[in-house]
Image (cartoon, rainbow, N blue to C red):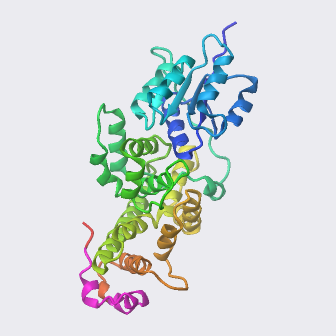
Amino acid sequence: MAEIERTPQVLIADADRWSAELLTELVRKARCDAHLVVLPDSSSVLEHCRDGWPDLLIVDYGLPGIGGLELLREVRRQRRHPPVPFFLITERVDAASVRAALPLAPTAYLAKPFNAEDLLQRLRNLLLEPGEEVSCPPSAAPRQSLEVYLAEARGSSAGAPLLQVVREALEHALEAHTHDLSELEPLFLLDPQLTGQLIAAANSAAQHLGSNCQTLNQALLRLGSQHSLNLALGLALQRSVSLTEPLLVPHGERIWQQSRRTAELARWLAQCLEGDAERCYTAGLLHLLGDLAVLRSIQSWRDLGGESLSAEQVEDALHAHAAPFGSALRTRWRLPLELRQLIAAAFQLGGGVYSKEALILHVAKLACDLPEDVDPSGLAGHKAARMLDLDAALLASLPKLA
């Protein structure tokens, strides 16, 4: 009787959700049919493995509980032949730490931030036989309507799709032997998804405590070049990361342009008024993240085999779900409260005392929403413009988006 093929089980143990997501995408890229289990601490790993060890463990050295090194020691006590493959990922690259791990024979001892391309190749070598190729059929079509699908997806949305130029640059970087974050950074500044996720990752509990990062530059400095690039590469590997549905593409292009336009106007006004220009730019870039997240979820629904769309369905979905998606996403990513408040000011000022930056965001959004043939100097009479002492001449000189 022929042996029934079994898909490999891979266990990822990392308390940092952003690192865990990156590792998940790399495993899926290496072997799309792998059965993945993601756990946040040592005790849950031991509980899961009570009835048997997976085909591969990828574990963070600093895992809460007994830690990654002791977990490796426990695996080796089982005296399995051949030994259970175990990748230990660590920030500890000093001689003493390496000497402590070597007798336990980790399959790989990878320094953080690791090289994503190197890890991907290691995973392929381990999870695939020489010359083996695995194809994964598309998932079954969703049974629920688009409206029900979006309502259920709100709490778990992966965020926005990537700009095509950014996605292509990241895919090229993943295949290249050498690449430099400095070459990609100007593109990152144009992309709401990358900006939002890197800021969220920089403020995660896994990073050093300190003041909140509220701009992309601050996030890149805290994360470092390699980790920032790894997280970006992980995004490029995700499903539905680009818009291919013809009805969605024009909406995406319009929303990306509105985001960038608002961001650049906010930065320009902040520079004129001696405000925090980079915070204003960031808030402007992120203020339509919910709209883009809805488009990505619709793309996912179509990728799964959802029925054909109408233009009216897309419009209705954006109208009903964009604001809730954006609010849920910013909260789940734990973006700094000050940044969330600044983003909200683009839409309404609310009550209380207004910061200079909040007023700037509101005026920038108003100017962006004006038809191209309307003179923005008319905004001088608006409450926010009056509070900023913006005169008609300055508003008339607002820059045009190239």
Note whether residue 34 is visible: no
Identify the residue at horizontal 37%, vertical 77% (top origin): 364
- Of residues 336 and 197, which is closer to you in this image? 336
Identify the residue at horizontal 50%, vertical 28% (top origin): 97
Q: Which x, y percent locates residue 371? A: 34, 78
State how many labels appear.
0
Q: Main secondary structure of the magenta part?
A: helix
Q: Which x, y percent locates residue 58? A: 56, 30
**The quarter of the displayed image where residue 49 is located:** top right
- Of residues 221 and 4, which is closer to you in this image? 221
Residue lying farthest to the top in this orientation: 1
Please indicate whether residue 188 sits to the left or right of residue 161 in the image: left
Please indicate whether residue 65 sits to the left or right of residue 138 in the image: right
Residue lying farthest to the front in this orientation: 96
- Of residues 198 and 9, which is closer to you in this image? 198
What quarter of the picture does the N terminus occupy? top right
Please indicate whether residue 312 sits to the left or right of residue 67 in the image: left
Identify the residue at horizontal 44%, vertical 64% (top origin): 286
Q: Which x, y percent locates residue 355? A: 45, 80
**The quarter of the displayed image where residue 86 is located:** top right
Identify the residue at horizontal 38%, vertical 91% (top origin): 386
User: Magenta region: which residues?
Assistant: 378-399
In this picture, is 108 found above or below 198? Answer: above
